[in-house]
Image (cartoon, grey):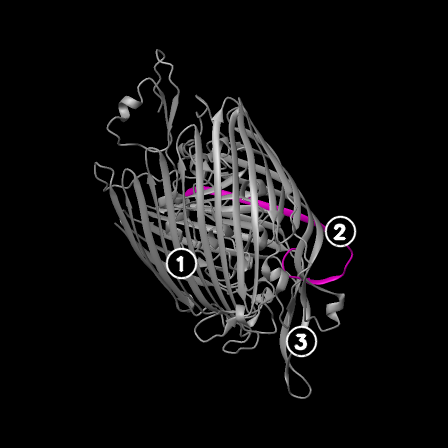
Amino acid sequence: MQKRDFMLKAGAIRWHRFTRRADAVFRSLGREIVIGRLSVAVLSVACAGNAVAQVAYGEGESAGLGDMERELDAVEVTAARVAVPLGQSARLVSVMTRAEIEDCPAQSVNDLLKLAASVDVRQRGPFGIQTDISLNGGTHDQLLILLNGVNISSPHTGHLAADFPIDIDDIERIEVLDGAASRVYGTSAFSGAINIVTRSLSPNPSPKREGSDDSGSALHGSVKAEGGSYGTFGAGASLAHSAKRLWHGASGGYMRSDGGTANNDFGKWRGWYSGRWQGDDADVNWQLGANGMRYGANTFYSGKYPNQWEADTKLHAAVGGETKGRIAVSPRLYWNRSYDHYQLIKGSSVGENFHRVDVYGLSLNARTSWALGTSVVGAEVRSEGILSTALGKPLEESEQVSIGHGHGNYTKRDHRTNVCYFLEHDAQWGQWTASAGLMANLNTGLDDRIRLYPGIDVSWRGGLHWKVYGSWNMAQRMPTFTDLYYKSPTQEGNVGLKPEQASELALGASYRARAVSVEVKGFHRHERSMIDWVMTAADSVNGYTTYHAANFKLDKLGLNVNGRVRLSDCLKGQKVLEQLSVSYTYIYQKRHDDTPIYASSYALDYLRQKLTARLDLRLWRNLTGSVTYRWQERMGHFVKYTPTTASDGTATYAAQTVDYRPYGLLDVRLQWAARSWTVWAEANNVTNHRYYDLGNVKQAGFWLMSGVKFTF
């Protein structure tokens, strides 16, 4: 809606939500009013109602586009140091909103990300148990994961990064930023970043539900239960309150399962609380989270040990805010703690490890807008420390710290401090948008040198439907403590590892109309000192027994194609077929050395091709359905161990290298959504295909789940 008074020359006001202030009508007199309402977006090909929505539209340009595409442009995303509306972003950001999440066949954040073309989700267990997430041919340690903009990645290992204290019902949207992003988020964002925004902390909250009173106050809640194959059962509840200035909510839940394979059982719990207060001079937000899980880890880290076991616990707290005025200042303070207990043989002290990681972070940004755009300066200090029985430098007996519960002491420790300084400027000139910045970094784990990582993003909007963009960015990633120190009968770290370095060039274009959207992106990433755990020729002499950490030089070329067709608009007269979405990713990788590699754990066994197709259906009244097919091809091979018996009768294992084989998975979901309740049923891996996603860990076959949710 626009209201213009040509007799008055005051500036424009942009509303992202309605206000109930008593003086609202007077504050708008003589001003141009642009009201944006958050609707739906796209995480590549993920879910119903998606749209490749990367274009910002001016006056009169929205004709011929669907409501959800226009409304999406009001969503603010963090592809730069300054949050900007998605349509104005100079860089590709994929977004999945609340509406799409509710329609997806997913029980965890990891399940949601599986359907995105550029995201590689390699799981060891179901429902987010030990899941490695990476972007565009990267590794799980190269992806930065944020919760409401707060870095929750661990310097211990990226294997545990996907353990979240939230449920998918807590999420307002998920933002995926492809490509090197160190100048935006710091050194951890090597191949990209995923930012999960919860409902009470979203700067673009969904419209209030019915039931709120005239003062703007509303109370919402839900309870749900689900169950399915292999003794799987889960339950959860949430409660949220919103008022004119205050939003906050809490949720909790529990899930357990016998697992789809031997020694793959698990139990996990979670709790979450977050809030946001909006004042006249400043906004303040806070969040608290805790989660834990205990699970059988059948062959998770070595095929020779099928009876592994692990338990993890995470604690998280953060507080931040932003002042209002010509110069906006945004401070943030956070703390992450994690505990990990690992047993190579369940119930035995052989190969048993304990780890405790503490991360403290403090950041401060200042931004101001002026005639040539918006400028930002910022700094972040991040302290990373670990106490362990396996990782770090030995402690004197007097320095050792008790593990507790009769488990002895932490005997090793390491610590490093990472300091980042940021400078960025964002500007728009007509149809052009540009963002250029620089990160200066010092890490005490390396030396006293300051290293610079620049980047620039540029986009051009050509008329109503087209957008072309390009970016060049550099990135760095420090080795994890596991990369440096871990040692076991099957693995050996390397304290001499160099930090990973990369420069990336990306080019792309998008076309968006009411019924059809297409997006194409290509990238080249030059990578130096890439870290991988590999077996070489020397290791093969010992019977393929040892993986060790090493650096490699790699080049990657990649292509992403996303498209969707709204069948309901194209095929008039039919009411069943809603939308068809298809995405495809191809990655080529070249290694610049001739060392024979018999097996790789991560970087060298990358995802070569991935195809995802989804058909959304409206079957009858409130009954909707979806059919999703995912096919992928992975390069490389792994060492498979087969139990055997030696001539003297002792048990042993026969080792052989096995190539990863392409596989396809078919998922089907049905859902009936009423005003205050929803019931659903879902069949995953309908064809009961057994496959290997990561190493020697064989994945489960057909899995049936159903559940019900009540809201008030």
**Which residue of the protein is positioned furthest toward the bottom in this rendering?**
648
Q: Which of 493 and 252 is in front in this view?
A: 493
Which mark is in front, 1 or 2? 1
Which residue is rendered at x = 53% and y = 39% of the image? Answer: 563
| Residue 213 on the magenta segment | no
Question: Looking at the image, can residue 80 be seen?
Answer: no
Q: Which amino acid does label 2 sit on?
A: His
Residue 238 horizontal/vertical position (percent): 31, 53
Q: Distance between the residues labelled 2 and 3?
A: 32 Å
- The residue identified by callout 1 is 290
Q: What element carries label 3?
A: strand
Instruction: Decide: few, some or many residues near mark 3? Use Cα within 10 Å; few <14, some 14-19, many ≥20.
Output: some
Q: Which mark is residue 464?
A: none
Kind of residue sitting beneath label 3:
Ala
Q: Mark 2 points at which residue?
A: 592
Q: Quadrant of the N terminus?
A: top left
Give the percent coordinates (x, y) of residue 520: 59, 37
* Residue that mark 3 sits on: 654
Magenta span contains residue 589: yes
**Label 1 SS:** strand
Query: In the image, which residues are magenta?
Result: 577-603
Of 332 and 108, the residue lying toward us = 332
